[in-house]
Image (cartoon, rainbow, N blue to C red):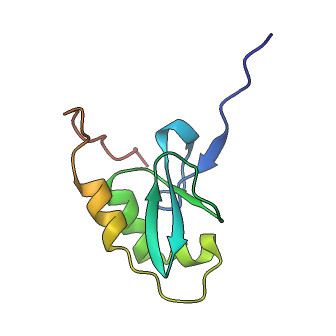
Amino acid sequence: MAASPIPVRTCVGCRQRAPVTELLRVVVRDSRLVPDPARRLPGRGASVHPVPDCVRAAVRRRAFPRALRSSAPLVTDQLEDHVATPSPDGAPARPAPQQ
């Protein structure tokens, strides 16, 4: 049996396409952007590279409300904290994708 291809999504920050395994899914919960690394939370999601540069670009461009179809202002502190902390396995943070 052939393996199914990995889905590809577009980062709302840098607008580059990447496999979902390289992107972080983000959903809205009570007007807050919540990271969904397991990709299991219900609702509409947006994908972003898990690096501060892409998150800042998406906030600056107001891409999250547009991608998530939200008319209310969104609080980004939880998402920014998530991408700013190093991974638990001690691996260095991923560099921002080249544009």
Where does residue 14 sit, x and y in percent of width and height?
Answer: 47, 57
Q: Residue furthest right?
A: 1
Q: Residue furthest top?
A: 1
Give the residue displayed 56% in from the left and 78% down from the top: 65
The answer to whether one can see residue 92 in this image is yes
In the displayed structure, would residue 21 be above or below residue 15? above
Give the residue displayed 67% in from the left and 38% down from the top: 7
The quarter holding residue 72 reads bottom right
In the displayed structure, would residue 77 be above or below residue 54? below
In the displayed structure, would residue 49 be above or below residue 67? above
Give the residue displayed 52% in from the left and 37% down from the top: 21
Where does residue 74 sit, x and y in percent of width and height?
Answer: 46, 81
Relative placement, left or right, of 82 versus 2 is: left
Relative placement, left or right, of 59 versus 67 is: left
Give the residue displayed 56% in from the left and 48% down from the top: 39
**Viewer-closest of 42 and 61:** 42
Where does residue 49 sit, x and y in percent of width and height?
Answer: 43, 50
On-image quarter of the N terminus: top right
Total marks shown come to 0
The quarter holding residue 67 reads bottom right
**Viewer-closest of 4 and 18:** 4
The quarter holding residue 76 reads bottom left
Where does residue 82 sit, x and y in percent of width and height?
Answer: 31, 57
The answer to whether one can see residue 19 in this image is no
